[in-house]
Image (spheres, rainbow, N blue to C red):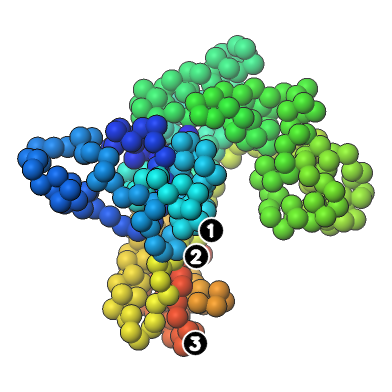
Amino acid sequence: MDAFFASVELLRYPQLKGLPVVIGGGRRREDDLFARARQLHPERDWTGVTLDQLPLDVFPLLSGYAGRGVITTATYAARQFGVGSAMGLMKAAKLCPQAILLPVDFEEVRRFSRLFKGAIAEIAPVIEDRGIDEVYIDLTQVPGVEEEGGRVLAARIQQRIFEVTNLTCSIGVAPNKLLAKLASEFNKPNGISIVTMDDLEARIWPLACRKVNGIGPRTDEKLKSRDIHTIGDIAARDRDWLIENFGRSYGAWLHEVSWGRDERPVVTESEPVSMSRETTFERDLHVVRDKAELGAVFTRLCQGVAADLQRKGYVGRTIGIKLRFDNFQTVTRDTTIEDFTADAAAIRHHAGQGLKRVDLSRRIRLLGVRVGKLARADQ
């Protein structure tokens, strides 16, 4: 999906279309926008005014942000300034201070996620869920897949998604998941890209190594230190050399992906290993002086994990906590209990026991709660 979190917000605020908009930061209620509207324009009668009629000056700008939040996504207008997902909001504010800042509405985003996946399933039911805004689709047995190399079918999927959600998506059609994922980025937004093995040299090899899922920042730095900057540079190296420098398994994998080979099937069902919620605080919190705030956040995280488990039909036996302190040290503690649970109070109790096993003398930057060793509740 194209800039999914931002696009969902633009359905609510169509007056922001075409403007740089960043999604992230803290919680904010729609009532706050109306309160700001009344403050800025006291002469106007705001009775009956809807969200899509709010003037632009009531929306908070990125320039006024102070804190440690990160960007979930940004509109394409904001990306023109170098702003992107996972970037700190303070850094983004320097690049694009005029961008409008909106919080994430997870409930609404999840609703649209279900809608777009349902729209796809009407046409091509073999789907692998890759998170809230992305899927792999096996088109092999879908009627019409041969027309224009799959372009006609991809256009049908795009059209159906738009009919159901009013949102656009970008689709890559290729012989395997690796190439399809890369192709899906070629023509954003609202694009369709067809890639075959014959396109490897012209379209895949010039791409930066980091474009491949599975090549992270550390590996990328190691590759660059050996004068390897593109996928084509990897392909030019001997397989044995890659194994010698990057290990037997990973080196062999690098060789395969650089030649566009990927045998992974589309997996329609996979069991989650764990479910978790975490939050990074706007300021480091002190265990004693900020006890009430920490307690409220801790309870909310436990309730969130419990709600996720119940909504998806799972229970778990291992309950863990994650803490990151002001010196960036991260610690975790897990407890495995006798009975499975998806109860918020039980999760909070056992997670609280885990907190007692941690030295809490430093200020806390991040707090998280996790439930693992999952089983289906109906089993």
For this rendering, which residue is in front, 141 or 42? 42
Q: Secondary structure at mark 3?
A: loop
In the displayed structure image, the side of residue 292 where residue 263 appears, left or right: right
N-term-proximal mark, 2 vs 1? 1
Amino acid at the residue labelled 3:
Asp
Residue that numbered label 2 is attached to? 372
Q: Secondary structure at mark 1?
A: loop
- Any part of residue 197 in sight: no
Q: Are the two marked residues, 2 and 1, in contact with CB atoms closer than 8 angstroms?
A: yes
Gap in Å between the C-alphas at discs 2 and 1?
A: 6 Å
Give the residue displayed 71% in from the left and 50% down from the top. 215
Amino acid at the residue labelled 1:
Val
**Which image quarter: residue 165?**
top left
In the rendered view, would you say 134 is above or below 296? above
Give the residue displayed 54% in from the left and 24% down from the top. 191
- Any part of residue 257 in sight: yes
The spot of residue 313 in percent (x, y) is 39, 53
Give the residue displayed 51% in from the left and 29% down from the top. 189
The spot of residue 252 in percent (x, y) is 83, 48
Residue that numbered label 3 is attached to? 359
In the displayed structure image, the side of residue 107 where residue 277 appears, left or right: right
| Placement of the C terminus among the 4 image quadrants | bottom left
Residue that numbered label 1 is attached to? 273
